[in-house]
Amino acid sequence: MRPHLPTPAYVISDAHIGAAQPEAERTLVTFAAGAARDARALVINGDLFDFWFEWRRVMPRAGYRALAALAALREAGVDVLWIAGNHDCWGGGPLTDAGVSYHVGPWRGTIGSWETLIEHGDGLRDAEDAPYRRLRAVLRNRAATWAFRHLLHPDWATGLASRTSHTSRNMRPRDGGEGLRSVALARLAAEPGLDLYLYGHSHAEALERAPAGGVYANPGAWMDCPQAVKILDDRVSLVRVEGRPRITGELRR
């Protein structure tokens, strides 16, 4: 059976909890409580945490309130899909214990009536991301993950990860997100049946109809501005969610 998420659905990305200002987590918790009254699905398109790793009986303390908020959403009947990002690609037990559906790699299915493809966006640019793709192969290697889990104390491991994560976290694409936009538009042109293509990662918000007819959307970085992509059966919107929700862009089918 093909994956399906109901609407209204919200998509957020790149909160980087643990490195972002504390307000980013507080706003996320408030948003999750409000979404329980409106949403039927929430998609976290990667990098909710600046660093996430799970030991056998230990997990990072940063962001526990956000994880509790996601568990409460699930208990309220909201579907929660988490797409692994480059900062939180080692998920597992505590996330699934909270009822979250954790997914590594592209997610393909339907959101409402939209044929949808979701990717965090890391490693997709051909030339610029080639060094990172080699590093990612090492970071996600089973032997490397085993060594990180068993040979380093969690405090040391977390400190090491936090010190080394600032490069990608603080990176703003020199092209203003144009590289990922080009990848998205090329994919939409190659697949006329694809209605909606969602990214995060670039920290550059986007909502654009491709010449082929599909829609490319990116909520931008929550850590910079609490914003979500909202999906209804007949439209996709960019919504600022801090304070009173405000639509900043909208495309109808």
Image: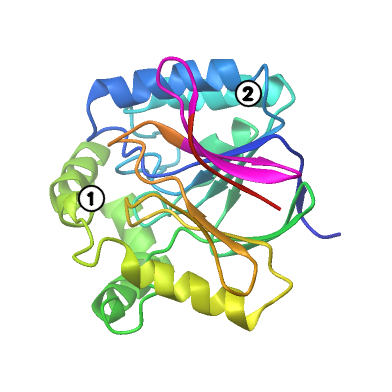
Crowd rating for badge 1 (residues with CA inside 10 Å; few <14, some 14–19, many 20+)? some
Q: Quadrant of residue 137?
A: bottom left
Residue 218 lies, in percent from the top left, at 46, 52
Q: Quadrant of residue 97?
A: top right
Q: Amino acid at mark 2?
A: Leu
Residue at disc 1, secondary structure: helix
Residue 199 lies, in percent from the top left, at 47, 57
- Determine contact: label 2, label 1, CB under 8 Å: no
Q: Quadrant of residue 223?
A: top left
Q: Is residue 49 above or below residue 125?
A: above
Query: Is residue 193 found left or right of 141 in the rendered image?
Result: right
- Magenta-span inclusion, residue 208: no
Residue at disc 2, secondary structure: helix
Crowd rating for badge 2 (residues with CA inside 10 Å; few <14, some 14–19, many 20+)? many
Magenta stretch, residue numbers: 228-246
Q: Which residue is mark 2?
A: 73
Q: Which residue is mark 1?
A: 169
Q: Which mark is residue 253?
A: none
**Residue ID at (60%, 22%):** 35
Q: Is residue 52 above or below residue 243?
A: below
Residue 16 lies, in percent from the top left, at 31, 39
Q: Is residue 193 above or below residue 34?
A: below
